[in-house]
Amino acid sequence: MSKTLDLSKSVHDLAQEFPGFTQVMVSLGFTDVTKPAALNTVGRVITVPRGCSIKGISLDDAVKAFEAAGFAVTGRGASQDAPATASMPSTASAAAEASTPGAQGVSAPLGTKAEGLDETGRAKLLASYIARLSSGESLEDVRADFVANFSDVEAGEIARAEQGLIEGGAKIEDVQRLCDVHSALFHGVTREEKIANAEETVMSSLAQGAGDLNTRFLANLPGHPVHVFSLENQAISRQIARTRAALGTRTVAEELRTLSQLGIHYAKKGDLLYPALKVRHGYSGPSDVMWGVDDEIRAELRALLGARAQDEAWRGRAEKVLTRADEMVYKEANILLPLCAQNFTSDEWLQMYADLKGYDLCLVDDAGTWDAGEEYCRRRASTAERGADDQDVAAVAAVAAGEVQLPTGRLTPAQLDAMLNAIPLEITFVDDADINRYWNDDGEKKLFKRPSSALGREVWSCHPPKVQEMVRRVISTLKSGEQDSVDIWMEREGEPVLVRYMAVRGRRGAYMGTMEVVQRMGFAREHFKA
């Protein structure tokens, strides 16, 4: 059998064709090639030259490694991106060429369907849409082609393709723009038809698998997290309709202010769903894309409420953000929640049920109670109470070896926990590897929610994309010794709040981590008023 390695082919295809290919890739540093999820997503749309470019590996070194393993290497000068399919039919080729601005000699009309594409080919088509949007082509033109090629494609496939684009090096901002293209499924004659068309298309495809049945079951289980998210999502949809109906009337500001409560719901997604999907289950798309769109919707609602005039330009902005919020309702119901239902374990749902008790409900009065979740909370509370009970001298002596010994004294874990919880501050500790290690918890609602599922995760995964860079800069400043603390002032729930980040260093000055301390400062303002 010939061992001619064509580098214009995708990594996935070469791995399937040559068993020895994977071993060479691993030796070069491409360890993800051994992971089926990565190979079947990114691997289908990336070539060896493209992979070398992303990882900063010399292509010459890669070629030498393959030749040393007995391969004859060709195609090293081809495009760095893998072809959509091995032999795309001529109609599909024309449509693919037409999808790129500046194509010469091609005049295929907008909305041309590319026939014969498999999932890999459709992923390539999505990548071309990003290029068109980035080059300045109108959203409506790209939507026309999206409708033609993706109206009957399972929503989960689109999510996988977007994840592959991100992992392949696409900019998150560009994929967020592609996320807006999904709203093509809403473009019917009337708003009701748009929603109906979207639901009919996606639900019919999802209903073919067990994921949707599981989502429906959990959504009808009182108190379960999926039930809570679904109820709130429906309430947001109704409030969007009321706000839209109020445009041009004196009540629009009041309706818009009520709608802005969706920030409570979006915060839950950002704390409990997006990071878990990304870190535990390998779905980075929702975290990197939908989370960013949530933030943009919240920011625009705040800007509209703070505007002085409600002129035509203001109304145009309001209509646009209402449409985006409506589309997010759809994406959550038909993409995000089914994805969670398919992947989250029973333990994860139980933990999330307990974490949700620290959040207010959004636009609903009651979401019921989940019996299994309540039992879990009782067991957890019982364990904590046993650890905090007073102990007689004999018992203390028996557990002396388990005490925390400090230079100036020693404490039992229960005493240390109670003492830290008595401090009127929200304290979080991130270690020198940027991993969330600890936060105090006195049982009260916090200004900054800290779900227990975030413990043991990188601190970046707990922040929305637009904030991550700021957090990285702050921690980098503290690590380097450039500063020992960084203060950030803000207003929350009607009172000033100080967030202080402090470098935690050992007695010899070695950096051990960062401590975040959140303090309400309203009491100081009231004190000095008196």
Image (cartoon, rainbow, N blue to C red):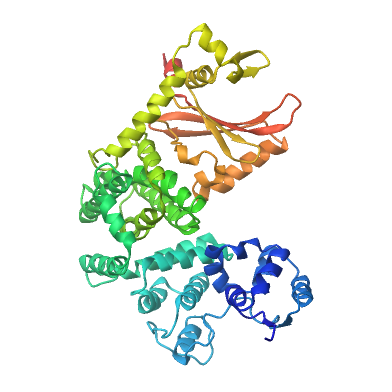
Q: Is residue 490 visible?
A: yes
Above/below status of 127 relative to 180:
below
* Image quarter of the C terminus: top left
Number of marks in the rendered image: 0
**Which image quarter: residue 485?**
top right
Q: Is residue 458 left or right of residue 448?
A: right
Residue 112 lies, in percent from the top left, at 39, 85
Q: Residue at 42% of width from left, 18% of height from top?
A: 526
In the picture as drawn, the residue positioned furthest to the top comes out as: 393
Residue 486 lies, in percent from the top left, at 61, 33
Q: Residue at 24% of width from left, 49% of height from top?
A: 235
Residue 117 lies, in percent from the top left, at 44, 81
Above/below status of 429 relative to 263:
above
Q: Is residue 323 visible?
A: no
* Image quarter of the N terminus: bottom right
Above/below status of 41 relative to 528:
below
**Which image quarter: residue 438?**
top right
Q: 253 or 185, which lies in front? A: 185
Q: Residue at 61% of width from left, 41% of height from top?
A: 434
